[in-house]
Amino acid sequence: MEAVSTGELVKALAVISAGLCMGIGTLGPGIGEGITAAKACEGVSREPQNAGVITRTMLVAMAIIESLGIYALVIALLLIFVVK
Amino acid sequence: MATDPFMAVSVCAAAFAIGMGAIGPSLGIGRIGSAALKSIHYQPAISSALMKNMLIGMAVTESSAIFALVTAMILLFTPVATAGWEKMYAIAGAGLSIGFGTLGSGLGEGFIASKAVESVGRNPESEPVITRFMLLTQAITESPAVFALVISLSLLFVDLPKSGFAYAVSLLATGLCMGIGAIGPAIGEGYAAGVACEAVGKKPSSFPVVIRTLLLGMALAESCGVYAMVVALCIMYFA
């Protein structure tokens, strides 16, 4: 195989790290949001009259967990589109 | 024996696809079986209903492994038309995508069905509600594996417009991104739905409220899987 220029090598490594970044970056938020939703459903089932408060608390927690997934998304998109 | 390099990569990718792709579903199905056996031990009188639920749950969990098997067959038996050497990386990416992608769905759906079987054992009179709940939530938990399958098939069958080393590596990165990105959301959704299934089994009257909260939570967990698919498609088409 002919030698690869440095520019191509940088681009190739940037793209593979973008893939790994987003791929591994969904592990934490996915599992965390699942556990949150599980406990919220359990609480709602036990006390349906408190469903509003429980759902609201769950959504606040989900937003914070989601932000970590968004960090990974932002870095991945930066790696794809901004690295030259 | 053929000596073309595409076949060499296809063979390795097929092996990885079904080898890795069978892990998640098998673990899930094993979990369902053990939950069913435990429930039958405690409640031998309703063993036929428990076995029915167990078999339905196992069949749905199996479907992720079938995706991996179908992809492996396509990799083995579809000849590659004239294409550049970048196609080898696309084939490798396809194998990685579906190989990793079924892990989460298999585990998640297995957890849901195991909790469903336990709930039927504890509350046999709410069996219709539980079965319906189980099937609905298993279908939603399947979706990350479907994303992985879509990325695999598009890597195999879509024409590759560009060329060069960076583009070839980007095809590999597409597969990695979607494959690993399908694991976490599916496990999370499966865990949420399993615990909710147990709760609905104990109190079938809470089905509407629980399903509303659960679908909200599952949609949010799914969003991370969608991010992975979006990044995978961006890498494939724009990098």
Image (cartoon, helix red, strand yellow):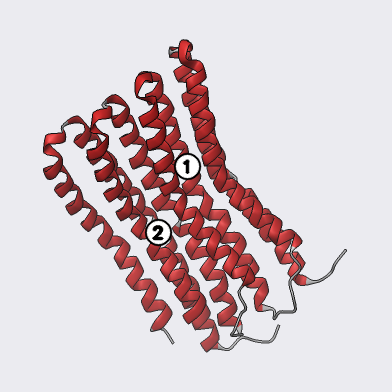
**Quarter of the figure with residue B156:** bottom right
Please tell me which residue lies in front, A14 or B207.
B207
Q: Amino acid at mark 2?
A: Gly
Q: Earlier in the sequence, mark 2 or mark 1?
A: 1
- Dot label at residue B99: none
Q: Which residue is mark 2?
A: B225
Point out residue B30 in the picture as x, y percentages from the top left corner.
Answer: 54, 32
Discs 2, 1 touching: Cβ within 8 Å: no
Point out residue B118 in the picture as x, y percentages from the top left corner.
Answer: 40, 24
At horizontal 42% and vertical 70% (from top left) the residue drawn is B231
**Quarter of the figure with residue B112:** top left
At horizontal 20% and vertical 36% (from top left) the residue drawn is A44
Q: Is residue A38 visible?
A: yes
Q: Quadrant of the C terminus of chain A?
A: bottom left
Q: Is residue A39 visible?
A: no
Q: Amino acid at mark 1?
A: Leu
At horizontal 47% and vertical 42% (from top left) the residue drawn is B107
At horizontal 44% and vertical 42% (from top left) the residue drawn is B138
Residue B77, relative to residue B105: is it above or below?
below
Please tell me which residue lies in front, B35 or B130.
B130
Q: Estimate how packed mark 2 is, as few (under 14), some (14 to 19) or many (20 or more) residues with alpha carbons within 10 Å.
A: many
Point out residue B95 in the picture as x, y percentages from the top left corner.
Answer: 62, 60
Q: Which residue is mark 1?
A: B107
The answer to whether residue B110 is left or right of residue A28 is right
Residue A14, relative to residue B114: is it above or below?
below
Q: Estimate how packed mark 1 is, as few (under 14), some (14 to 19) or many (20 or more) residues with alpha carbons within 10 Å.
A: many
